Amino acid sequence: METDPPFHEFYKSLFNKNMEEKTPQTINKSDKELVIVEECELPLIDLSRLYLSEPERTECKADIARASQEWGFFQVVNHGISPEILEKMRSEQERVFKQPFDRKTKEYRYLNFSAGSYRWGTPSATSLGQLSWSEAFHIPLSDISRSGGFDTLSCLPSTCYLRLNRYPPCPLPLEVFGLTPHTDSDFLTILHQDQVGGLQLVKDGRWIAVKPNPEALIINIGDLFQAWSNGVYKSVRHRVIANPLVERFSTAYFFCPSYDTVIESCREPAVYRKFSFREYRQQIHEDVQKLGTKIGLPRFRV
Ligand SMILES: O=C(O)CCC(=O)C(=O)O
Ligand SMILES: [Fe+2]
């Protein structure tokens, strides 16, 4: 039974188009203003410092604020989630994705998730550079609290969700992304990645590769946090490079406000006009439908 999504069959015309072109497009060329130079470690924050007395507490918060301004990304250790739980999450995730493809698409109910929680590839892609060579389960937190008896989760907005990502080995890693470049449309993201690597982000106008640390959690600022902080904290573009040999797993938790929440800059003069999260989501949806791509925050500049 095939477990991988049928990328080759479904995107055959894109592969053929790429072969026919005299100089096949590679993703590095198509994103040509940004060339990869190095692998680096994200700023590392030891969260246990928050429980110490002053000045450690304040210094820890200042480090977080600095990383959020300069990188939009940082990693945390001593976050309270044991390596055993992270390992268990990874092995359960592997089990879910190892189900036959047909079952993942048609029989989502076997997992007790809502309809439409499974996605793979990029249905709207018109070139290989727009295709994401990955599959994901997108699980509203309300589904988890309902099925797992985690009552404490029910006090979080129903818009929060968990995304389980799997990146199968990809035969054309220079032409196809694991996940195409994007910023996250939420407030804050918490990401756990395995040891394979592939996550890259833009720093000072260049793509850099994030050195994996499976013990750490990666935190990144989302679009709403950027707007709320009036552009002080950065929602940074990131992407995942496909791997030709090994599969990769990651889990992302997207912390979102309720749809009615109004995002308004905390400072004057405001860089962005105020908007509700509902309005933001609708605008993204509309842009993706009409233009094939997300515009995001630039739409809301005053
Ligand atoms: O897999 C990763 O490392 C990144 C995932 C990501 O950026 C996302 O799901 O939005
Ligand atoms: Fe992301």
Image: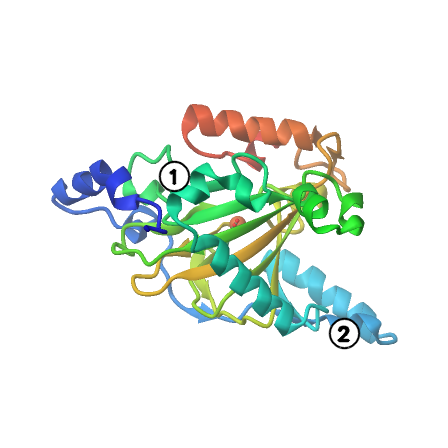
Discs 2, 1 touching: Cβ within 8 Å: no
The residue located at (55%, 35%) in the rendering is 296
280 is higher (above) or lower (below) than 203 = above
- Res. 292 image quadrant: top left
Q: Residue 177 at what x, y percent from top left?
A: 36, 51
The residue located at (40%, 55%) in the rendering is 167
Q: Secondary structure at mark 1?
A: loop
Confirm whether residue 230 shows in the render: no
**Residue 122 bears which disc, if any?**
1
Q: Is residue 70 left or right of residue 199?
A: right
Looking at the picture, tell me which residue is in the foreground, 79 or 52: 79
Q: Is residue 12 left or right of residue 179?
A: left
Q: Residue 190 at what x, y percent from top left?
A: 63, 56
Q: Is mark 1 within 8 Å of ligand 1?
A: no
Mark 2, residue position: 48
Q: Which mark is in front, 2 or 1?
A: 1
